Image: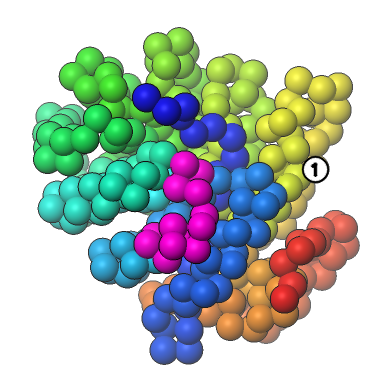
């Protein structure tokens, strides 16, 4: 088996044209900028507006990335859907293209489902994809999905499919849950990625493999720097600096705010476009966001053009 993906990954924001169709050219350009800043690509994550994208749109964008020469070994696309067959189709497609892993939400429409039901969902996907290269990363984001990934479910899946269940993204925002997952499974080769750089340093100190974070879209170099230097004397200071930038974005709706920042620093106003039901930040919010970021010394070098 090839080496597993590690480090900082970005759930890449998806650019849209005026007619709200995905803009593949700007998408490829953004992904290349992120890779140049040493960040991997968790395309079609929450911050990608993935659940506002059709299966075919996701597949086409992924193919455009690979055709453009972006290394699929640096990709962990989101492939978890409510429909089992959609999850299988997206996951098999990602594996076929050589992606390092598949970041997989549970089927999230029905609430209060049992671990047995979730186990059957993931087991069916593994069996139907039927490829030894498949590496699944379970996506735990209960505040959004309302369908948690329990430690007991992880344990059962690892026992049944140790070669295919590779890790988790814990976006619960609950460090106690992340730490419990690390303590229970990291020693067995189960890779844990906190869902925010807020827990990057703490995660690495407890055996984590990096982070998969929204703000890696806009602050990739600084977040990767902490990943690379987490054992250095100034690691705690770096973490504080990262938290400061993230706190600015968190004052606003995150996805529209990040897109507005990219629009500002890239010089391409169309980047601010989001797909309904999301709406862009208004003029007042936009002005305040950019002012806050500039006051903090924030920049996105190399993005313009």
Name the residue rendered at 65%, 59% in the picture.
33
Q: Residue at x 55, y 27 (%)?
A: 209
147 to 12, vertically: above or below: above
Circle 1 packing at 10 Å, graded few (<14), some (14-19), many (20+), is some
Q: Does 235 sit left or right of 261 as displayed?
A: right
Q: Residue furthest top?
A: 187
Quarter location, residue 267: bottom right
Q: Where's residue 92, x and y in %? A: 23, 47
Residue 294 placement (x, y as % from top left): 84, 65
Viewer-proximal residue among 199 and 59: 59
Is 194 contained in the magenta span? no
Q: Quadrant of the N terminus?
A: top left
- Name which residue lies at 18% across and 19% down: 160
Residue at x 80%, y 36% (from the top left corner) = 238
Please provide the residue range marked out in magenta. Answer: 62-75
Asked if residue 63 lies in the magenta stretch, the reply is yes
Q: In terms of depth relative to the viewer, which is nearer, 278 or 160?
A: 160
Q: Is residue 200 visible to us here? A: yes
Most common secondary structure along the magenta stretch: helix
> In front here: 181 or 288?
181
Image quarter hosting the C terminus: bottom right
Give residue 57's position: percent from left, percent from top.
Answer: 32, 69
Can residue 177 be seen? no
Image coordinates for residue 216, horizontal then vertical, percent: 62, 50
């Amino acid at each position: 088996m090839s080496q597993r993906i590690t480090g900082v990954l970005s759930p890449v924001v998806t650019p849209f044209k005026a007619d709200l169709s995905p803009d593949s050219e700007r998408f490829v350009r953004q992904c290349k900028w992120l890779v140049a800043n040493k960040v991997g690509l968790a395309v079609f994550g929450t911050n990608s507006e993935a659940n506002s994208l059709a299966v075919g749109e996701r597949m086409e964008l992924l193919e455009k990335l690979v055709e453009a020469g972006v290394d699929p070994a640096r990709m962990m696309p989101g492939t978890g859907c409510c429909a089992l067959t959609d999850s299988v189709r997206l996951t098999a497609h990602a594996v076929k293209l050589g992606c390092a892993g598949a970041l997989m939400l549970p089927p999230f429409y029905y609430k209060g489902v049992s671990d047995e039901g979730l186990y059957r969902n993931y087991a069916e996907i593994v069996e139907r994809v039927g490829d030894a290269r498949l590496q699944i990363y379970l996506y735990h984001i209960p505040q959004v999905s309302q369908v948690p990934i329990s430690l007991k479910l992880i344990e059962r899946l690892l026992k049944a499919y140790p070669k295919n269940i590779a890790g988790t993204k814990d976006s619960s925002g609950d460090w106690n849950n992340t730490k419990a997952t690390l303590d229970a499974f990291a020693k067995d080769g189960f890779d844990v990625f906190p869902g925010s750089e807020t827990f990057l340093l703490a995660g690495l100190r407890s055996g984590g493999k990096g982070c998969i974070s929204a703000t890696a879209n806009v602050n990739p170099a600084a977040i990767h720097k902490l990943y690379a230097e987490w054992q250095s004397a100034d690691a705690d200071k770096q973490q504080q600096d990262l938290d400061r930038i993230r706190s600015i974005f968190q004052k606003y709706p995150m996805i529209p705010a990040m897109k507005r920042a990219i629009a500002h620093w890239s010089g391409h106003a169309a980047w601010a476009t989001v797909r309904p039901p999301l709406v862009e930040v208004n003029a007042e919010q936009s002005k305040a966001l950019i002012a806050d970021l500039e006051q903090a010394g924030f920049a996105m070098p190399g993005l313009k053009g």
